[in-house]
Image: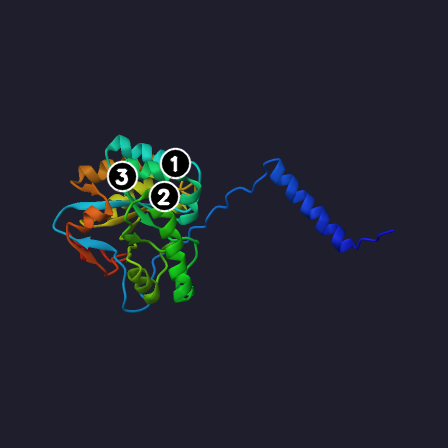
Amino acid sequence: MIFVSSRVSRVAIAFCLVAAGVFFGIRSREAPVVEMYEPVQARGHEMPVFYVRTQRKACALTFDISWGEKMHDKILDILKEQGVKATFFLSGPWASRHRNAVKRIVGDGHELASHGHDHVNLSEYSKEDIAENIRQAHNILTNMSGATLKYFRPPNGDYDDLVVLTARELGYETVIWAVDSIDWKNPGVSYIVQRVSGLVFPGAIILFHASDSAPQTPEALPLVIENLRSAGYELVTLGQLMEMGTPARDDPRGRPRSELPGS
């Protein structure tokens, strides 16, 4: 008689359960990414881009996507209806799971940019880890789209000198934002519209999300676009905005309205 230890039995049972899960098509659901965007103070001398100094009354709508299944198509539908081109910062894992969405973003004429791979605070990591995070996303996005990517937004908007310098060495300009819609906090459609309309200025880079964590964005976005256009703003991609002036590396967030460009 052969005796099998309880530990071996447990391993065998676990293996059978996993095999059964694979056989019957059971798979884990995509885990949501917890957004933690807050104004980040400069930690050194290397600064990212926050806005563009320009004489033109223009601004760029940018959308981060790290997870989610529903919101990106709604956002793309709205932008198409409104005739607006925007910039989408995509994470590598999300892009690899949503190839059709990436294809549509590029096909609709929007600009593709990198939001890195693992959604972590890169300022807490070594240069090698930062570079690997950027490279992984770069390989996925470029191989999938054939696009040339120029801009990188670190997860959570978290950065330090090492993050900015490492991204630059890999051919990326690190871009944060000047106006946060805070749609990720779900403060209400009216609040999002009033906030963006009140804080925008010529050359502003505006942060939105096209992920399931921001379900109020599809309702707020048409009203934001209407308000910006009524105020005389051109809505352009980040790359187009960069061509209209000089990248500005002084953080405008939290400054009085009177100190902002165009005031």
Residue designated by label 1: 100
| For marks 2 and 3 on the same chain, the one whose residue lies earlier in the sequence | 2
- Report the side of 244 relative to 196 (left or right): left
User: Looking at the rendering, which quadrant does residue 194 occupy?
Assistant: top left
Helix or strand or loop: what does disc 3 sit on?
Answer: helix
Residue designated by label 3: 224
Q: Amino acid at mark 2?
A: Met
Mark toward the viewer: 1 or 2: 2
| For marks 1 and 2 on the same chain, the one whose residue lies earlier in the sequence | 1
Nearer to me, 234 or 189: 234
Mark toward the viewer: 1 or 3: 1
* Residue at image point 33% right, 54% down: 153
Q: Amino acid at mark 1?
A: Asn
Nearer to me, 73 or 184: 73
Near mark 3 (Cα within 10 A), the count class, few <14, some 14-19 or many ≥20, is many
Which residue of the protein is positioned furthest toward the left in this rendering? 55
Helix or strand or loop: what does disc 1 sit on?
Answer: helix
Find the distance from the CA under tag 1 to the CA under tag 2: 10 Å
Residue 149 position in % (x across, y down): 29, 50
